[in-house]
Amino acid sequence: MSGLFDRLSDQNLARTMDRRSFIKTGALAGVAASVPSHIMKAAPAVLRRTDDRTARIAFIGTGLRGRNHLNLILRRDDTEVVAICDIDPDALAKARKMIAAAGRPTPRIFGDDDWAFLKMLEMEEIDGVIIATPWLWHTRMAVAAMKAGKYAGVEVSAANTLDECWDLVNTSEATGKPCMIMENVCYRRDIMAVLNMVRQGVFGELLHMECGYQHDLREVKFNNGTQPYGGGVEFGEKAFSEAKWRTWHSVHRNVDVYPTHGAGPVATMLGINRGNRFVSLTSTATKVRGLHKYIVDQAGEDHPNAKVRFKLGDIITSVIRTQNGETITVQHDTNSPRPYSLGFWVQGTEGLWMDVNDSIYVQGKSPKHRWEDVAPYLEQYDHPLWIKYAANAEGAGHGGMDFFVDHAFVEAVKREEPTPLDAYDAAAWSAIAPLSERSIAAGSAPQAFPDFTRGLWMKRTPVFALGDEY
Ligand SMILES: NC(=O)c1ccc[n+]([C@@H]2O[C@H](COP(=O)([O-])OP(=O)(O)OC[C@H]3O[C@@H](n4cnc5c(N)ncnc54)[C@H](O)[C@@H]3O)[C@@H](O)[C@H]2O)c1
């Protein structure tokens, strides 16, 4: 197993030394490609190509989320925005305006049709592609980007079906190009401090995690066609932004359709795909009420959308079992009135943390049987990345965490190193969706996770946020 793993790593490394790097670094590239990866880690910077400090980034999807990423990429002085692609002229115009306002050269523009991104990917001068499009496009675009020899940075969830999960893994392995799932919540400040606590053994041995996506999305799933949130009960073609495409998943599928904001962070804490793995899952859905009720409450029984029969259960609860004997509860709850929460809970043999009430209990430290305020712990265990980059993250979306996910992507692209979240993570986390759909349809029957690493999880070791670089 060890030999196989090393050979795979070395092959991947050799493949990432693509044509561009060969031309740029000349003979050195040839040397580098033949040096085993463990030696490359210790090699002089010039061999690892850290001499090239610019990442040439292209975008597929310049809607609301794509422009968040664009803003962060434009704030850096180690990036070029070389191309943008969107099928909506208005989204393209807004992105162009941002690029001009940042004093950057005009990028090449693509968007004549749904597949224009393929033309864009032919450009040699692209290193990495950030994909922020509707879900059904994610895997198609990420696979095409990797096949074109680019790093793929794909929004969440990365895949919709198990076949798509395998496509991401197989393509990344075959091309040697990383596919990073751009899961920003992995970089939330409290989450990273808790990750630090987990690694330092504060909670003892981990037993149980809870997480989810508990977000009243009724005003995201319906709007009036001109604004992103609310103001009407339209979805599909008559709607704007996410209501155009996201709501269809609630019509057609009974599934935890958006599992990675919760599952990603707990996966990094549990070492999923790196010494551990998701083994099986059961999912159960409540009845379907919230979206129909919202339409009727807002627009009355006579509105045409009041006739739509939604399929998505209002609250879906999945329980995952891991190889190392932990359990994880993942909830999807987007159709009901409620404050936003990702409902994190991290519990081990020595204590637990819960984000809903910002509380912690650590045996021998906390008053017996009483919650403590977590704030002093978060300060004490603040992650080195946050300590170093808090000022850079200021003003970035979602409390600053968006800075870190783009930072990691750009730094990996610049160095031609693996991304800290990869195709195996994209596959394992995104697989929760299709597996939950199967489980619900089969009366909550357990569903086995494919081992997307084909056994390499036994050998792979954690890499996510080990230091203060990215
Ligand atoms: N990580 C987060 O916190 C976060 C937050 C918001 C959205 N997202 C994710 O980002 C993605 C995009 O969401 P959004 O809110 O920007 O949606 P959006 O509808 O505002 O933007 C999507 C864009 O993709 C474009 N598009 C659609 N098909 C295309 C194609 N074939 N080629 C090129 N462009 C195409 C659309 O014209 C649109 O401009 C989704 O996957 C969503 O789940 C993640």
Image (tube, rainbow, N blue to C red):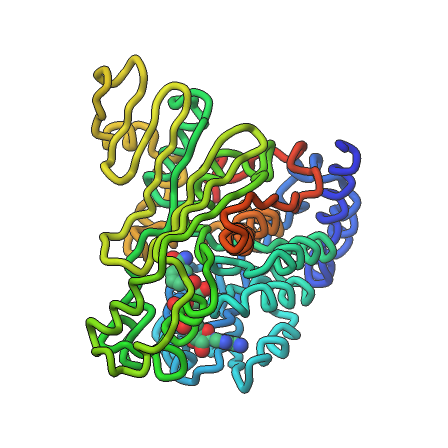
Foreground pick, 61 / 98: 61
Counting from the top left corner in percent of width and height, residue 464 is at: 51, 40
Foreground pick, 453 / 177: 453
- Is 414 placed above or below 112 here? above
Q: Residue at x 25, y 18 (%)?
A: 366
Q: Residue at x 72, y 57 (%)?
A: 175
Counting from the top left corner in percent of width and height, residue 130 is at: 51, 64
Left or right of residue 32, residue 448 in this image: left
Q: Residue furthest front?
A: 443
Whether residue 185 is visible here, answered yes or no, is: no
Q: Residue at x 52, y 55 (%)?
A: 441
The picture quadrant where one finds residue 434 is: bottom right
Foreground pick, 384 / 358: 358
Q: Quadrant of ligand 1?
A: bottom left
Foreground pick, 375 / 245: 245
Label tally = 0
Left or right of residue 307, residue 110 in this image: right
Counting from the top left corner in percent of width and height, residue 25 is at: 70, 55
Left or right of residue 159, residue 396 in this image: left
Whether residue 459 is visible here, answered yes or no, is: yes
Q: Residue furthest top?
A: 364
- Is 69 placed above or below 87 here? above
Image quadrant holding the N terminus, namely top right
Counting from the top left corner in percent of width and height, residue 468 is at: 45, 38
Q: Residue at x 41, y 24 (%)?
A: 348
- Is 319 placed above or below 422 here? above
